[in-house]
Image (cartoon, grey):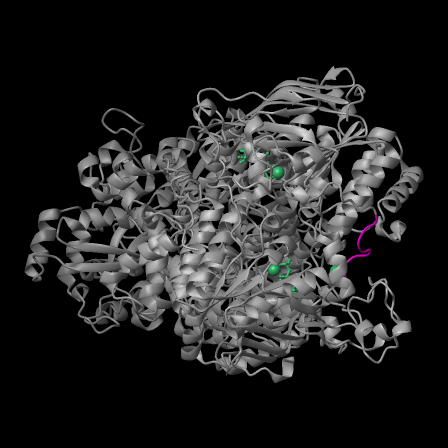
Amino acid sequence: MTANAVTSNEYLLDIQALTKTFPVRRSFLSRWRGEAPKVVRALTDVNLQVRRGETLGIVGESGCGKSTLARCIVRLHKADAGSIRYDGREVLTLGAEDLRMYYRRVQMIFQDPFSSLNPRMTVGQVLREVLTVHKLRPKEQQGERVRELLGLVGLSPEAENRLPHEFSGGQRQRIGIARALAMEPDCLVADELVSALDVSVQAQVVNLLLELQEKLGLTVLFVAHDLRLVRHISHRVAVMYLGRVVEVGTTQELFEAPAHPYTRALLAAAPHLDPAHRVDAPAVSGELPSPLNVPSGCPFRTRCPYAFDRCATDRPELTEIRLGQSVACHLFDPALRPADQPAEVR
Amino acid sequence: MRASYVLKRLLQIIPTFIAVLILVFLLVRLLPGDPASAILGDRATPEIVARKKRELGLDQPLVVQFWIFVQHLVRGDLGESTSLKVPVLRLVGERLPVTLFLSVYASILGVVMAVPLAILAAVRRNTWVDGVIRGLFQIGLSLPVFYVALQLLTLLGAKLQWFPIGGYGDSFGDRLYHLFLPALTLGFNLAAILVRTLRNSILEVLTAEYVEFARSKGLRTRVVLSRHVLRNALISTITLLGLNIGALIGGAVITESVFAIPGVGRLMIDAIFGRDYPVIQGLTLVFAVLVSLVFLMTDLVHARLDPRVEHA
Amino acid sequence: VERGGTLVYGRYADSLFLDPVLNDANLDIWILTNLYDTLLQPSANGKGVQPGLASSYTVSSDNKSMKLTLRSGIKFADGSPITAADVKWSLDRARKPDNGDWSGSLASIDNITTSGNTVTLNLKRPDPTLAAALATFNSAIMSQKLFNAAAGKNDAEKAKAFAEKPIGSGPFVLSEWKKGSYMVIKRNPYYWKKGEDGKALPYLDAVRFEIIPDDNTRILKLQAGEIQGAEFIPLARVNELKANPKINMALFPSTQVNFITMNNRPKLKDGSTNPLSDVRVRQALNYATNKDALIQIVTYGVGKPMNSFMSSTTPLFDTSQKGFPYNLDKAKALMAAAGYKNGFEVTSMATSGSANDLAQLTALQQMWAQIGVKLKIEQLDAATKTARYRANDFQMRTGGWTNDINDPSQITTYFAIYATVESLHTGFKSAEIEKLFEQSQSETSRVKRASIYRRIQTLYHEAAPIVYLYETPYPVALAKNVKGFVQIPLGNNIFAATYLDK
Amino acid sequence: MTTTAPPVTSVAPRRTRRRPKPTLIAGLLLLLPLVIAAVAPKLLAPYSPTDFDYTAILQGPSAKHLFGTDNFGRDIFSRIIFGAQVDLQIAVFTTLFPFVFGTLLGAFTGFVGKWFDAMIGRVADLVVVFPFLVLVIAIVAVLGPGLTNMYIAVSAVGWVSYWRLVRAEVMAQKETEYAQAARVLGFGPSRVLLRHVLPNAVTPAIVYLMTDMSLGILLGASLGYLGLGAQPPTPEWGVMVADGKNFMATAWWIAGFPGLALTLAGVAFSLIGDGLADALRPRS
Amino acid sequence: MSAPLPSPVLRVRDLDVRIPTPRGELHAVRGVNFDLQPGEVLGLVGESGSGKSVTLRALLQLHRKPVRVTGTIEYGGHNLVGLSEAKLRNVRGAQIGMIFQEPMTALNPVLTIGEQIRENLREHRGLTGKAANERAVELLDLVGIPSARTRLSDYAHQFSGGMRQRAMIAIALASEPRVLLADEPTTALDVTIQDQILRLLLKLREQLGMSIVLVTHDLGVVAQTCDRVAVMYAGRLVETANVTDVFSAPKHAYTLGLLRSLPDSGAHRRPLQPIPGSPPDLRHLPAGCAFAPRCAFHTNACLGSEPPLIEIAPSRASACVHYAKLPLVNEVVV
Ligand SMILES: Nc1ncnc2c1ncn2[C@@H]1O[C@H](COP(=O)(O)OP(=O)(O)OP(=O)(O)O)[C@@H](O)[C@H]1O
Ligand SMILES: Nc1ncnc2c1ncn2[C@@H]1O[C@H](COP(=O)(O)OP(=O)(O)OP(=O)(O)O)[C@@H](O)[C@H]1O
Ligand SMILES: [Mg+2]
Ligand SMILES: [Mg+2]
Ligand code: NI
């Protein structure tokens, strides 16, 4: 099956050509001189589909637009252009009332265990507020539901009367998850859910997520920069670079046969756990370009060891190179004769 | 880039300036009583009052008065004081330097007092030294300015005769000598505010990682304190100082009366009580421009001290 | 006597306009006579006149003209001679009805003629006050030539320019003036009057007026020796300064009376009824006022009770006036008779920041409470207070008065004659007083005039349009070495014979 | 998978008890006598604050008159006691409106932004370019002297500080993850602002409120000095200090004791402010 | 490695750090012992709050007044603990350099990078003026910052994250120290940049013959970079070993738990094996082994007194009572 043949029903979330820029404050003089306004290109023409019940991992270096994408999906940012269809319905144009209904289905869980909970509300208040505002449970049933939710995320019922600062980081992330679950959503957007946690605690939260997904049939968008973790829990993975999706594929394909030179560099740079398996040369050289000044053509060309002249002029589109794996790289252009392609890549 | 920023900030002052203009013009005319009453006192007969009003142009409708005011203003003419019968511009020219001198002097004294004591308090935090410094300034902050001024006058001026009681002085040195007590009064008040914030920001900076890094480089404590700690701690203090200079100029109102200093503060009070419309208007505009300039300067100094500030 | 030196004198506020005719207030008047000279001068006791620029004057037998002979060799401060033409021009300017507030004092003059060094004033009617008027600041002699040479298109502009740097013929001439901060007047070398040592006055080289609005600062500066004189010493400090061996705390007799103006109209500006329109109420308030206590509290003993509306230093003051002795019973009886047994509430305006006003009214609050009158104090800045006063929009206000001319007529027109300023804006009007006053204005017999004024004072006392309080002197603190300074009862500061003792 | 995640609350429930803040307690203890004096002055004051005693003018401190008497023979101690009411009233009324209005406006403009924010910003600029004291004096001069008009004047000017503080804080707080979480949970803007953002943004304003209260009292004193503050015979400390300025050399107690009272109040407020800053910080 | 070891550059014995806090004294580092050999990269791993940074700071005597440091830190024949400030300055920076986790906060924002390098050169190398400038350029070159000369006058905020970290390394290297203490130098960086920086450190170690103490909580970094590892838990070292030994056969229940909780050890989307609970509060430590409450293997032997770090094999030590009975990382326990 090719991507084009998929009906919208198969994809719970269908993102097309999503673009988001952040304006940079300009000097008076530059405006006066009529200079073109500068923008941070956080997302450029992002195409991405998420299937029902799957976990889609999103990886990439800092500033490549992972969080922006997640936030656009839950409408915390207003996208500039493109479309996001959720279950066939356009999300970007939802009115206030429909948006509420949308949030009932799509919830976000946040990265920072310290700032993602209102420091002045007890856990019980946090959960009850959700139940009350959305009239999910009548008052008398709320207590029971709160205990149920706490149990679901592995917290004991006494937690209800405590304030966030009385919990450890891992516990706070559980509270955040419980808060999202209170809405009974079918899709979770998790932005760096466990990045701030210690490894030993990370595993606890990851387990919880896996378990809940199993139990509740959740679709999960898992944004992270820990490749090991993403590989462990994702069905499919998308790799982003400077506001673009450069490669997307099933976890196995992507990790075992990475196609895009950036994906390969990323995987090579991730420190391997085996001390016997050491590499001397750096996986990739050079610094990440500024999102204010994205290179023309392929954004990765400035650091790419295989870049050739066309990379500077044409922007490569995301195209399927094999079943379930798409890549945005000229090296995979079928029009290119095999002789022109570097041997290492194929 | 800096030039464009300055230009932009200067242009930004203009709308504020115009609003200030209209506001003051109206406000001043809302004051009960009028210049004629203020000048003539109780005795004047109705005819005399009417004559005076005509003379001052107060018999015209407000709109006409405003139009005349604007016309004059465009020509750089702020009008003439109704009570002192002197062009406002000349008055301001005479008085403003006094107040500026006093404000700058007070700021310098304030900073000179605040910085070493704040460092001391921060480095010795939670010891008796810290307690005494903070307590002293807290008390200073809780006393009315005129009380402090009068105490200083009585003690250092009249009793010990170390400093003159009032006046302004002629030469620069003489000025420093004459204005010492008023500058001290204002400076003390300023120092009280500064010590508080500076101490806190020094404490904050002391725990910053770059201070740790500087120490790990084996630099002398003095170098660490001056180059790394103080410079960073001063950044927030400069902003505060700038914000307070406006208040300082305002605070000069009382200090100037107590110390008999012919500055704009006293002029303003006299003008308000004397219903000297042109002076009130002129001074307000001057204040507005001055404070805006101080803010601008604060920004520039801030940008100079803190390279992170991009006023793009 | 010692010659030379500069006297630094602390004033509470600066002069505004140094033109003898067009000036605005006491701030000008009280120092003008140091800069400008008049034909006649007030005598030292303040009750009569003595020769000035005119060495003598004679009044015709029909009292319809006055002939003055100018002193010979008199000069303005720039060295130019003072001529009869200057005199005529100056007096004509001073009596022009449009010119200034004081033109009325010369209103009896019909025309002025000159011949040689004599000047003749031809009068419309006999005028008993003319000599005093000629000894008053507004009759100062100015140089026509210098005035006309001043910049400006018309007389008003010229007057302004001239007053910036006036040149008169007084003992001093203005040398430097930074408005609102200081003024320096220096010795006029052409001054005609001789001192004790036979040489021309003044003794001082210069007087420097420093403007120090804060009472306390003025005193501190004097104590620190930075200034040698300070005016308007708060009465609260008088005793303290008297005890200071380095300071001469002078209390110059004055024409100052302190009183409370009452609105006598039946209705107030806001339409409410006014209990003060009842003469019994006004008398009651007067009787309920313990002047001796007030003098103790407010003036720290330096004042004395006010027995007539005019001060005891005013010519023709009637010594038999009794004023209102403190009598609570009488006050209560009058209140009851007026139907205010339980009192009422009354508001008085006060000048904000004036310690004396406050002390006065806080004390009255207490005193009047005894007869059930609840006094509320409303502090207003001077401009507002004056504006409300002028609009008759008040119930009571604190008031003070000093004469400008050595004659009772001025105070009387203001206090008792409706046409001037509605009798201090009280609204008080007495046909009999108006008639008597009219009569007095052309009565040249001093005895007859005195009896008319006795009657006026009695009538005024009976009607009690104001609350009589007390008279106060001018409190001036001087360094011990300052000699020969006087402030005359009219308030003028006279530095001509002042010197600094070594 | 049926095993639920291990219950973890039993392991490290970091329950930290709120410890009393020494500065806060010290501040409250200092303020206590003033509050008592303000509530029941009649119980404490031996004399009336306004009655004259001509026989006891300018007497130094003694057993009869603890703090001496003033130039009207009024008992300074009693005046200070009664003054507590006036000065605490000044402290509250000069700050109440600016605090409430400034905070609400700051919350609103900080949260909504856009042209309304820009407009208020311009108005604030206007207010800020006038030196505070001068502006207050001018307004009081327009309206007439007295405490009520002083309150009006201060309110017209004083809100700007609170507006700035709260606006900046709200702008910061609305970007926090819990505020975003609240939005994603489908809560309306007013709920997000009032229940989530504002309670966490208001702390600096409350702390500043304390400083402002003592500044309010001082302002009252300054205006009193110019005769624009509390009107006689109201026993207001600042005005008492101002009244005593003529007796500084001869009767120090007239200005001295009210000065002490002012200092006491100032120190109390500032200690409370410091203490509150500590106590209101959500995590300890 | 079995060859006799050369004498260590740094010998740490019984290092204790006590931090008084309003809520009681915090015993952040408790009896830490280790040696640092010349040219060696020693990894210090452990969870957040386990005392890694505090230990590192103690090595340079950077702790200030209320904090108490006891024990011995032998460097060049001196005990750094209790050494006078003046003498310490000859060690700090000059002999032992330090770099930090967050280059943004560790570089002074208001001084140019050049100034920050030069001040080090002036203090320890006596270089000023042009000479200092030239050396600064060389240093920036060395750490791989392109067009080094022009970038000397830049401020930290004008650099990207990776460049900042390089600059910080250049500053620390200015005085050519023999020991580099690196406190999580790559945690704030992206993997590709982390990779570059770690390689740079290894290269510099070779070139300059430095010893490095590398603090990290990323076991991958340890595996790729370190020669030896010291594992820290609740302020104590619980295991020290050569890097290969640790990853193949951990001898402390905590190390084992850590390795097992990593995703690599389980099958795709299968539950991981976390260590239950969270690290203890250093103010209220349990009696006995601090890890016991979270330990799957704990017995009564773990309670009572805290097990000491004892040598269990050449250059290998563990503080686990059950070290001999621990399973391998991938072994399934029943
Ligand atoms: N509110 C904002 N205003 C301006 N620029 C923004 C804003 N939010 C994000 N950006 C910019 O957009 C780009 C993408 O940011 P984003 O946070 O999506 O990256 P990320 O992939 O999540 O990075 P990280 O891994 O560091 O979280 C960055 O350059 C960032 O600076
Ligand atoms: N200055 C200090 N005051 C109070 N407690 C401190 C201080 N410095 C460190 N601590 C505490 O000491 C303990 C050890 O801290 P340390 O910074 O060494 O941990 P770490 O292992 O470096 O953790 P991380 O991986 O988070 O950097 C922690 O509980 C920490 O809260
Ligand atoms: Mg992100
Ligand atoms: Mg650390
Ligand atoms: Ni710039």
Q: Position of residue E194 (x, y in %)?
A: 73, 49
Q: Which image quadrant for residue C83?
A: bottom right
| Residue A227 inside the magenta-drawn segment | no
Question: Where ligand 3 lies, by image quadrant?
Answer: bottom right
Magenta span main SS: loop
Q: Is residue A86 visible?
A: yes
| Residue A282 inside the magenta-drawn segment | yes
- Magenta part of the protein: which range? A281-289
Number of marks present in the image shown: 0
Q: Relative to the observer, which residue lies in front, E7 or B114?
A: E7
Q: Relative to the observer, which residue lies in front, E214 or C372?
A: E214
- Location of the N terminus of chain E by quadrant is top right
* Above or below: residue A242 compared with residue E150: below
User: At 56% from the left edge and 29% from the top edge, which residue is drawn?
Assistant: E235
Q: Relative to the observer, which residue lies in front, B140 or A130?
A: A130
Q: Is residue D136 visible?
A: no
Q: Relative to the observer, which residue lies in front, A16 or C27?
A: A16
* Above or below: residue B25 compared with residue D136: below
Q: Which image quadrant for residue B169?
A: top right
Q: Position of residue D80 (x, y in %)?
A: 29, 38
* Above or below: residue D224 compared with residue A14: above
Instruction: Answer with left or right where residue E13 lies relative to residue E270.
Output: right
Q: Position of residue A303 (x, y in %)?
A: 82, 61
* Above or below: residue A281 compared with residue C386: above
User: At 49% from the left edge and 48% from the top edge, which residue is drawn?
Assistant: A204
Instruction: Answer with left or right where residue A132 lies relative to residue C169.
Output: left
Q: Position of residue A24 (x, y in %)?
A: 67, 68
Q: Which image quadrant for residue B246?
A: bottom right
